Image (cartoon, rainbow, N blue to C red):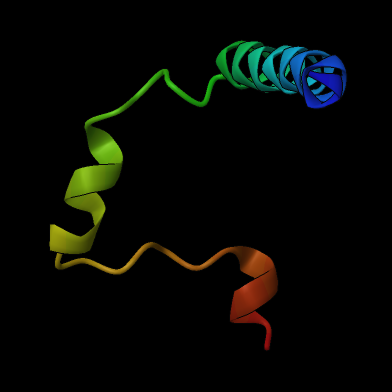
Amino acid sequence: MNALLVLIPLSLALLVVALAAFFWAVDDGQFDDLDAPAFQPLEDEQAPLKRSEEAR
């Protein structure tokens, strides 16, 4: 019974952290485009180099 006094608040705290991380990811735009990353490995062309990478 004493274990429940520790485990219930711990599980609620983990739930709050998980929900905060989920809503942060949604606000940050992590779920905006779910289709394009799946096609990136299939592209034949290499991305153009930035100017700072060309100078190297």
Q: Residue at x 61, y 22 (%)?
A: 25
| Residue that appears at 67% across and 82% down | 55
| Direction from residue 5 to residue 53 in the image, left or right | left
Q: Position of residue 41 (x, y in %)?
A: 21, 62
Give the x, y percent position of residue 51.
Answer: 63, 66
Q: How many marks?
A: 0
Q: Quadrant of residue 13?
A: top right
Image coordinates of residue 27 in percent, x first then y, are 63, 11
Q: Which quadrant holds the N terminus?
A: top right
Q: Quadrant of residue 16?
A: top right
Q: From where the camera sits, is residue 39 visible?
A: yes
Q: Nearer the viewer, residue 50 or 9?
A: 9
Quadrant including the C terminus: bottom right
Q: Residue at x 37, y 62 (%)?
A: 47
Looking at the image, which is closer to me, 12 or 6? 6
Horizontal side, residue 41 vs residue 4: left or right:
left
Residue at the image point whose x is 81% and y is 27% from the top: 3
Q: Quadrant of residue 24?
A: top right
Viewer-side residue, 29 vs 50? 29
Q: Nearer the viewer, residue 54 or 31?
A: 31
Whether residue 45 sits left or right of residue 5 in the image: it is: left
